[in-house]
Structures are given as C-alpha cells and as structure tokens.
Amino acid sequence: MNFDTILSIALGIGLAAGTGFRVFLPLFALSVSAYFGVWPLNENWQWLASTNALIILGIAAITESLSYLIPFVDNLLDTIAVPLAGLAGTAVMASTAADLSPAVTWALAIIAGGGAAAAIKSTNAVTRAASTATTGGLANPVFSIIETGIAVVMSILSLFVPILAVFVVLMVAFWLYRKYTRYQRNRRQAAG
C-alpha cells in the first residue's frame, strides 16, 4: 500500500465522518475539490466533478444546514438523515479510495465510511432528541451550528490534511462515546 492510497483512505474517512454531521456538505466539498482537480475521483464517481453535481450538492448543503436551525424540523430531518449519512459516508469512501481492489474498497467504504457516518449521525440524533425534550428545542439551533461547523472543519481538513482529519475523527468519536455513555448513565439514574 503506497502513500497515495493511505491519503485517499484518510480523505474518505474524514469526509465520511463529516457526513455524520451534515450529509451534503462533505459531498459538496468533495465535488468542489474534484471540479477544480484537487483530488481525483475513482472512475465511476467522475460525475461528482460535473457542474450539475456541484450546483445540486451546493443547494442541498445550504438547504440542509439552514433546515437544521429550525427546532422540530431538525428532529424530522434526523429520521431520514441517519440512513442517508450511512449511504453518503459509504459513497465518499468508495469514491476516494485509490489503488485498492473493488472488494477492499467496498469493505472499507461500508465499514469505515458508512459505519463512521451512521454512528456519528445516530449520536447526534439522540443528542438532539434529548435537547428537544429538555429545552423544548430552544438549544437545538446551537447544536446545529456546532454540527455544521464541525462538518466544514472536517471537510477542509480532509481535503488538505487528510491524516490530521483521521486523528480528529478519532477524537470526535471518543468525545461522542463519552457523551453517549454520560447520557445513558443520566437516563438510568433518572429512571431508577
């Protein structure tokens, strides 16, 4: 495995994690980078570099980010965003993995890409539901702005410093795990 392959895997993992915060923003970032030739895409994913994909993903990213600022709408979005994040994470990983056999590419895409995105989005959905229950949704826009910011940072890091993006993914995963275990502990204490 050469360094370009490692970089392409790191790029995919970073962008996949970003889709766990916002589904379309990392896809838009990947489309922009492919459009300007910053990162090459696998042959079957060249359509992401098209002007049409750039426009559609840009509109989708803006619409998604703004929609998450509306309490209760954000909870509805989470119901469809969890599986979409898994699919988007799988797609970005599959589109960026270089010099790997199709079996390895898809295994990495499903496990590392889709798994990371779905786990992060699921944790965010639980956090948002808890925020809605405890604050009536008033704190949800704050969480949404933070999530969008993380998606932007992850996309930029992934495109320009992919190895660092993987370390950030690991740090975010650890933070989300701690947040989730704290939530579960508080829920058990409240129940009993």
Image (cartoon, helix red, strand yellow):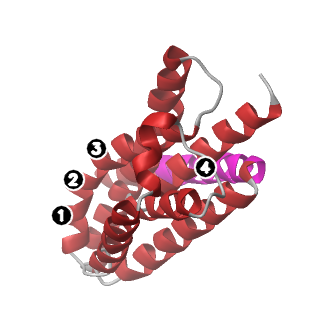
The stretch in magenta equals 163-184
Tell me the residue that label 2 is attached to: 80
> Is the residue under label 3 in contact with that under label 2 (CB below 8 Å)?
yes
Q: Is residue 100 left or right of residue 189?
A: right
Residue type, mark 3 in image? Pro
Q: Position of residue 173 (x, y in %)?
A: 59, 47
Residue 192 in view of the camera: no
Q: Are marks 1 and 2 in contact (CB under 8 Å)?
A: yes
Residue marked by disc 1: 76
- Viewer-nearest of discs 4 and 1: 4
Neighbor class of circle 2 (other Cα within 10 Å; few <14, some 14-19, many 20+) is few
Q: Nearer the viewer, mark 2 or mark 4?
A: 4
| Residue 101 position by quadrant | top right
Q: Is residue 151 visible?
A: yes
Look at mark 4 in the image and give the residue it sits on: 14
Q: Which residue is mark 3?
A: 83
Q: For the N terminus, which image quadrant?
A: top right
